[in-house]
Image (cartoon, coloured by chain):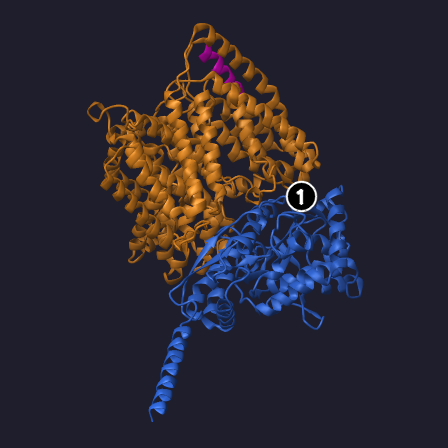
Amino acid sequence: MDFVYQGLALVLAWPAIGWLFAGVFVGLFFGATPGLSGVVGLAILLPFTYDITGASAFCFLLGMYAITTTSDTLASVLLGVPGTGASQATILDGYPMAMRGEASRAFGAAFSVSAFGGVLGAILLGISIPLVKPIIMAFASPEYVMLGVLGLTMVGSLSGNSVVKGLLAALFGLLLTTVGYSIQGGVARFHFGWNDILEGLPLIPVVLGLFALPEVINLAVSAAPISRVPKEQVKGGMRRGIRDAFENWWLVLRSCAIGMYIGILPGLGGSIVDWVAYGHAVQSSKDKSQFGSGDVRGVIAPEAANNAMKGGVLIPTVAFGIPGNAAMAIMLGAFVIQGVVPGPQMLASQMDITFSLIWILVIANVVGAGLLMVWGNQLCKLTFVRGDLIVPGIMFFVFMGAWMGNQVMSNWYFLLGFGLLGYAMKAGGWPRPPLVLGFVLGRIMENAMDVSYQTHGLAWLYRPIVVVLGVLAVAVFISSVLGIGKRKRSNVELKADIGTEKESAKTSLGLGILGLVLFLYALIRALDWPYDAAFFPIVLSIPGLLLVGPSIFFDLKKIMAEKNEGVAAGNGDNIRVAWMFVIVLGVILGTLIIGQKITLCVFIFLFLVFWAKEKMWMAMAQSAAAFIILELMFDQLISVLWHIPIIDIGISD
Amino acid sequence: MKVLFRVVASLAVISAVFMFSKVIEAKPFYKGKRVVMLINYAPGGGSDRSGRVIARHLPRLIEGNPRVIVKNMPGAGGLMAINYIGEIAKPNGLTVSNFSGGYTYQMLKDPALRVDLTKNPWIAGVGGTSIIYARKDTKPGLNKPIDIWKVTNPRDFKIAGFRITGTKDMRERLTFQMLGVNHYPVTGFRGTTKSRTALLQNEVQAFGDSRAAWFKTIVPNMIKTKIAIPIYHYDKFNADGSVSAYPDLPGIPTVSALYKQKHGKMPSGMEWEAIKLIQSLQGSMVRNTTLPPGSPKAAVTAMRKAYSKLAKDKKYKADAMKSLGFTPEFVDGATVAKLLNWALNDNKKVQNWLLAEIEKWKKKKW
């Protein structure tokens, strides 16, 4: 017990506690800004810790990292844009809550469970370290494959009533992960001579394109505020959300356990945790009808899980020197700089340092959540502002969020391409979450499957944990199917995605035909490759081709029925939607010609003047603010690598 | 008199102009500038750590004291950044690399490499070696390096690797093939973390790591805890053709020493020539620094000077010891350029043999 107090003393001593608060403030910023994240923050802050000793350095870095998955809720709920990779699932219900004027309630629930999840994750870290070694040792590549399969069974829960479309979306998401070098490195698959995708498609631009761009475009086209409910009619604020968190305590505990125990398995990452937690929340609920429309449980589950995960990823890092994720790889560097060697000695002679890390997580989560609860209500006012006024600001952060990572133009091409796809999926009633789930799981599964076969042959299928997980996966799948049948018999509509109420059968048909072409191309192309490169694409293409047939058939049937009923097709909004995509294309072309800084600022000005019909001074002010943010934040602080345009007037340096 | 006055006055003016322009020219190239150090792998790894330690000290050592910031540009096995420096980055001296590898892509004529590395104005290289280690409980039990020959079933001695055409995998396959050890290379591990985890889980029995990881992670977590033992490290290939061990790895045999211990003579043959070729490059430029082709001479000169000072700088060495566990040894840019030209242009027979060998590995059923 002495170590517990010694660890606390290390953190509370000055200047360590000061650095902790500094880290929390920085973390709030990095989490809230789309495209930035804990990893980016750690990479930027690490050099500063050379001159800070011991506990202060850990307080600064870990304090920053601990809070990013709390503040990322801001963008997810308010704007429908994932703040970090770990808050994608929060959008599905968080944003609809904002659309109902319940952003405050969503924040109250999210911040409460984030704090609780972070604290519980830290406590579990403290008591679990001696116990989890057998778990970490037992989960090798075969178990990762089966975890992936178990994760994929969530597709049923994420597909609403469109199970075929959900499965197709998941298969397509899995297929997307085969782009780039094959596992053995010998074949560059589906890369068409484009080096930028040799390592695969980038996650953040894909997710921002799929989710953020369609929502922003809708906001621009409708010009309505995010909240469709006037401010005066909104019921239930932050306190209601906090009450929701307490009322759903059992879901919170289960989600924390999911976050924690997925977190301890190195390499799985935050993106999986929130989807698995969300899927579990849907599966385990008796009343699923509100998921996708603003069910607070759809916010509670992923937010509790992604904070608890922070304690989980520390375990293999501290106990074995094996970083639990990319952020921990950087933390490992920080440990080394401070002369601390992660491994068994941290559990033997350096327990005070180990416990100081736990206390940092506890304090940072509580302080961060508290600060956000104080500020959150002010930020919620954004949801009542006219939509087309805030579109330029959101687009600005979507563009820059997509740019972060390896900072090449292809990120924006993917943003646009997946934006078009995401819009079409939404219009056609194709759920987007299964695509993202497949995309997140695909690389892990193919890689794990390949290594499993090399190391164990087919015997990997008989490992005890693999069998247990396999049985669990089958049980979950059967339960999903039975649940779908029950809902269909009760005529319960389950929304799988934001705003999938209106479906266009023609758009759906178009997607089906696109799917047919892509799966067919993938199959034919894969047949020319060696076994290790061909296996996964073939295994995905065959069921894809089998399922796309019924999807096309049902869409044709629906189109015929609508024709007979004389259902008119609306096209007023479609023209404005098309224009919005042209604007996005214009920003990309402008960047190629004159660079990002000028193009983004000009875009903001022109959009506000000509689209939103706003006053010139307001447009100039926003444009100037954008330039200042680009210069001070992205250029000087984060030191972004700008695209070098054709006409370079020196601003890109 | 008047003529004399005019001549003297003209000379004075000309001298003043000349001196003024010299004052302007004397301003260091990098004064008031910002340099981006590009790293071709993700944050947290060995490339990143070594680059960041360098970036911390460079501003002090470059004339003009520019700001140096680190950017990671991972992708395509390090190629994205290598291509970027070679064909996209402006040749204005403001982007400098701290890359790992890259040369084997040119050696193996990988179409994904779009630039000619011999055209780069090389600044410096940092040499290194890797240490291969294996689980003690590998059947029938490993207590010392020479016990690896006791392994009878290749599947009892699985070695984690990334890609067949990667430097790491090629060296290890060539070495174990040359040594005549029963082994089974498992490729496809996505990085050192997964590989080390797999070794701890006994999914594989051997892996190779850099010196930084060896001292800071492997020794405390696997060697001192008696999970694994070191098997060998790659020889240092000296300019005179001799080989030697790295002095900070006492007790760990080199490849040639291990071979000699078993076979009674120094290694030879095409495997050894290929290992020599690859390790000659790794030994001098496992991390390499260049500016984009066409960069100003003043920038190249200033950078080379800075790296030359860095190699002897006490503060940098202390920092490197703290962060990496060893003090990197630098070679100058001219040596890097010479070595690269030798490797790529004077070893066609070995390169062709290696390409054929890789094709065999791809088809081999283990």
Q: Is A596 situated above or below A391?
A: below
Chain given the colour blue: B
Q: Is A479 situated above or below B102?
A: above
Could you tell me which residue is drawn at 60 percent across and 52 percent down?
A: B227
Q: Is residue A319 visible?
A: yes
Q: The magenta stretch spans which residues?
A: A477-488
Label 1: few (<14), some or many (≥20) within 10 Å? some
State the image quarter where residue A539 is shown.
top right
Chain given the colour orange: A
Residue nearest the viewer, comparing B28 with A147: B28
Q: Is residue A24 visible?
A: no
| Residue A368 on image: x %, y % | 30, 43
| Residue A155 on image: x %, y % | 50, 25
Tell me which secondary structure the magenta stretch mostly adopts: helix
Q: Quadrant of the N terminus of chain B?
A: bottom left
State the image quarter where residue B21 is shown.
bottom left
Could you tell me which residue is drawn at 57 percent across and 15 percent down?
A: A550
User: Could you tell whether B150 is left or right of A414 in the image?
Assistant: right
Which residue lies most toward the top here?
A: A564
User: For mark 1, what is the residue?
Assistant: A186
Which residue lies most toward the bottom here?
A: B1
State the image quarter where residue A233 is shown.
top left
User: Could you tell whether A323 is left or right of A624 in the image?
Assistant: right
The amino acid type found where label 1 is placed reads Gly
